[in-house]
Image (spheres, helix red, strand yellow):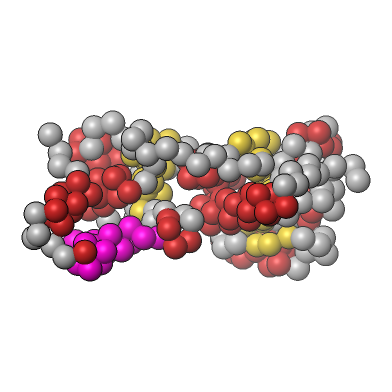
Amino acid sequence: MKSDPLQELLQDVAAGRLSVAEATAKLRYETLAFARLDHARTRRTGLPEVVWGPGKTAEQIALILERLQPHNPVSVATRVEAPLFDQVAARLPGIRYYPQARLCALFNPALGERHLPGCVGVVSAGTADGPVAEEAALIVELLGSARVVRLWDVGVAGIHRLLDNLELLGQADVLIVVAGMEGALASVVGGLVEVPVIAVPTSVGYGAHFGGLAPLLAMLNSCAAGIGVVNIDNGFGAAMLAIQILRSAGRLQAATGTPPSQSDPAG
């Protein structure tokens, strides 16, 4: 049976093998041979440490997730390809994989989740943008425990597909818009809604698209107000920002007793 690092730490304090100051330092971060795990990040920022998969071995990912698990309801590694996940899963029974988003998650049912108020809408321009969009949607669901509505393949080449779904857009308190090619979808959505829009350019496109630079610049130069832009293919970063927006809304709601308003896409 695997030991619980937190329980071991408390036992060391109770037995006098560690001082309170030493235990506090260990709760802040844990030193491994190849990493320093920031266990205090959730208390400090409201968001847990998340593992970046590329460049790490299966052994490293498995050990990091195992050590993060006692401190978080869900511990996540991103951009983990299927063959690498198979090796991680052999070391961590019970870990879950989401192949489209290339995410793996280790759950700790003993820790209660804090469900954030509100809803995040994730909108993708094309099917090829799906992996980045699904990464964003799953991060919101896993780490924010927030409701997500998905709207796929509604790019500007067939804009009637987007206009037919304005009611769905209206359910969201924050929108994440994922688009490659020329990246125009973020500007269109930004002109239809009254909630924050987080634009995610993707590396999907032809030569002059420059691997995502063209939609990145288009989104940064959008004439629609209220749009923020994250890095190319950064669905994870967009999701974390959306979670923080919902958390801030929850704090305001708690302070004022006023529920957050829902957007009216036709307004």
- Quadrant in the picture for residue 146: top right
Q: Nearer the viewer, residue 130 or 29?
A: 29
Q: Does residue 212 appear left or right of residue 73 in this picture?
A: right
User: In x, y percent, where is residue 136?
Assistant: 55, 46
**Compared with residue 146, is residue 22 higher up or lower down, i.e. above or below?**
below
- Say which quadrant the N terminus sits in: top left
User: In x, y percent, where is residue 247?
Assistant: 60, 52
Q: Residue at x 78, y 42 (%)?
A: 262
Q: Nearer the viewer, residue 98 or 155?
A: 98
Q: Residue at x 90, y 42 (%)?
A: 266
Q: Residue at x 81, y 62 (%)?
A: 225
Inspect the magenta stretch and tell me whether residue 117 lies in it: no
Magenta range: 21-41
Residue 192 seen in render: yes
- Residue at the limit of the structure toward the right, as seen here: 267
**Compared with residue 41, is residue 192 higher up or lower down, i.e. above or below?**
above
Q: Residue at x 8, y 60 (%)?
A: 17
Q: How many marks?
A: 0
Residue 152 seen in render: no
Q: Does residue 117 appear left or right of residue 94 in this picture?
A: right
User: In x, y percent, where is residue 38?
Assistant: 33, 61
Q: Does residue 185 appear left or right of residue 27 in this picture?
A: right
- Quadrant in the picture for residue 170: top right
Q: Nearer the viewer, residue 208 or 261?
A: 261
**Compared with residue 105, is residue 226 higher up or lower down, i.e. above or below?**
below
**Compared with residue 68, is residue 17 higher up or lower down, i.e. above or below?**
below
- Quadrant in the picture for residue 98: top left
Q: Does residue 104 appear left or right of residue 206 in this picture?
A: left
Inspect the magenta stretch and tell me whether residue 30 lies in it: yes
User: In x, y percent, where is residue 222?
Assistant: 78, 64
Q: Nearer the viewer, residue 214 or 53?
A: 53
